[in-house]
């Protein structure tokens, strides 16, 4: 339907405007943010991204990172402070929201409580002066796609959260917009319903030809829904890539810690170089990095020194080898067939994930809180980050 291109887009709320926003939202962590200056609050800075036609892009990051503000600028609900925004090769910075041919689904559904489901979905079509026959056809087609035909005569108050969200989506898709914008549409649903709605969204995107821009703080949603995901922090893009790319090759410690459940473990370590050979050391544990990693480190002219060593919880294993590190076992979290084991090493916390389902289908728990055990990980499991900047040394 349409591509969306953002070139060096930024959003700065002037001090007076920002003060009004903060009065509504008392989150203290943003008051002390580096995004705040004499000019105001820089919600989004130098955001550049090309969203391809019919692509499903997910903006993800913690609260206050600028993802919803970016979405609202695409919609035209927020004025752009700087940069250019194109939809279908047309500059739309000064174009009214109603003339951008985009539809938006909000977190709180934003349904008209006095209208039936049918009239909620039909509202935008009536505003465009469509014929009654066309309106009826489009409403019923959308209701069938979303499985809400039986609720067309009901009002929103008699529907569940998931049903209300389907109505909100239906109201958007009947317009056949060039771009579908979704601002955390599943955040008000319980875990089971979120899983169901994720599956339905994947089915929906295959049935309608439009470009999706989806905002969430839930990295599971981002990883399962997005063709590509855009990870944001403090108004800046940290990394753009497919779910597999950002998981396997995180650009920095923020991305590495944000993507993955449980999040990646980080240890203080050192990196030594001997020609084309690199060795990681952490106490008694030491291991040469793999050939491919060593080639990337040499290409980036990495000389060695203090680093941050990243290891995903699934990659830590128990061992009796002398070349290992010791840690104290803390809390155990049973997660079905696996257990999350909280460890403490040199005063820092870490998590190990291991399977505890035995061959007989029974759980086998051999870990005791308070015990000291030895652990290691394969060299292929190591991520190396600069101690000062947090940048991935292999990227």
Image: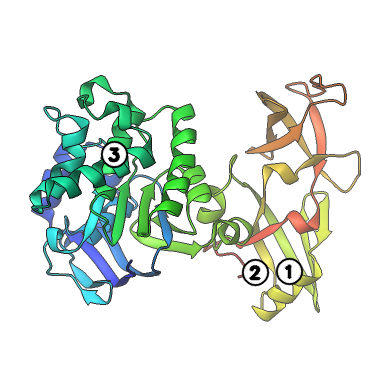
- Spatial distance from mark 2 to mark 3, Cα to Cα? 38 Å
Residue assigned mark 2: 394
- Farthest residue to the right: give it: 321
Along the polypeptide, which appears first: circle 3 or circle 1? 3
Along the polypeptide, which appears first: circle 2 or circle 3? 3
Say few, some or many: other residues with alpha carbon within 10 Å of mark 3 (under 14 / 14 to 19 / 20 or more): some
- Name the residue nearer the viewer: 190 or 318: 190
- Name the residue nearer the viewer: 218 or 103: 103
Quarter of the image with the N terminus is bottom left
Residue assigned mark 3: 107
Where residue 10 sits, quadrant-wise, is bottom left
* Residue 31 in view of the camera: no
Q: Residue at x 38, y 68 (%)?
A: 53
From the top left corner, tell me how far across and down residue 314 is, in percent.
71, 42
Q: Residue at x 83, y 49 (%)?
A: 284
Circles 2 and 1: CB distance less than 8 Å?
yes
Label 1 residue SS: helix
Residue assigned mark 1: 293
Where residue 325 sits, quadrant-wise, is top right
From the top left corner, tell me how far across and down residue 190 is, in percent.
42, 27
Where residue 391 sits, quadrant-wise, is bottom right
Residue 178 placement, left or right of 268? left
Label 2 residue SS: loop
- Spatial distance from mark 3 to mark 1, Cα to Cα? 42 Å
């Amino acid at each position: 339907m349409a591509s969306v291109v953002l070139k060096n887009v930024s959003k700065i709320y002037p001090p007076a405007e920002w003060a009004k926003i903060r009065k509504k939202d008392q989150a203290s962590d943003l008051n002390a943010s580096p995004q705040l200056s004499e000019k105001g609050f820089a919600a989004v800075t130098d955001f550049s991204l090309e969203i391809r036609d019919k692509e499903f892009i997910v903006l993800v990051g913690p609260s206050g990172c600028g993802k919803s503000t970016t979405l609202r600028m695409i919609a035209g609900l927020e004025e752009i402070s700087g940069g250019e925004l194109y939809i279908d090769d047309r500059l739309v910075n000064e174009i009214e929201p109603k003339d951008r041919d985009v539809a938006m689904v909000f977190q709180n559904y934003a349904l008209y409580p006095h209208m039936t489901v049918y009239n909620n979905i039909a509202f935008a079509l009536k505003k465009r002066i469509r014929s009654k026959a066309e309106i009826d056809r489009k409403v019923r087609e959308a209701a069938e796609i979303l499985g809400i035909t039986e609720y067309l005569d009901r009002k929103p108050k008699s529907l569940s959260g998931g049903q209300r969200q389907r109505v909100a989506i239906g109201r958007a898709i009947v317009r056949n917009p060039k771009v579908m914008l979704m601002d955390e549409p599943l955040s008000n649903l319980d875990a089971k319903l979120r899983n169901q709605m994720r599956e339905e969204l994947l089915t929906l995107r295959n049935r309608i030809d439009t470009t999706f821009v989806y905002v969430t703080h839930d990295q599971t949603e981002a990883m399962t829904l997005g063709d590509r995901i855009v990870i944001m922090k403090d108004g800046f893009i940290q990394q753009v890539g497919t779910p597999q790319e950002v998981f396997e090759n995180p650009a920095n410690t923020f991305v590495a810690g944000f993507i993955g459940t449980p999040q990646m473990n980080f240890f203080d370590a050192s990196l030594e170089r001997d020609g084309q050979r690199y060795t990681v050391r952490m106490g008694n544990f030491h291991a040469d990095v793999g050939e491919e990693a060593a080639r990337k480190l040499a290409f980036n002219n990495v000389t060695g020194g203090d680093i941050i060593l990243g290891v995903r919880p699934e990659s830590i294993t128990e061992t009796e080898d002398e070349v290992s590190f010791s840690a104290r076992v803390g809390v155990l979290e049973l997660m079905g067939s696996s257990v999350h084991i909280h460890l403490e090493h040199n005063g820092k916390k870490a998590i190990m994930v291991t399977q505890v389902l035995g061959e007989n289908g029974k759980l086998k728990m051999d870990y005791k809180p308070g015990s000291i055990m030895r652990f290691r990980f394969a060299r292929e499991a190591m991520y190396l980050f600069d101690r000062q900047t947090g940048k991935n040394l292999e990227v």
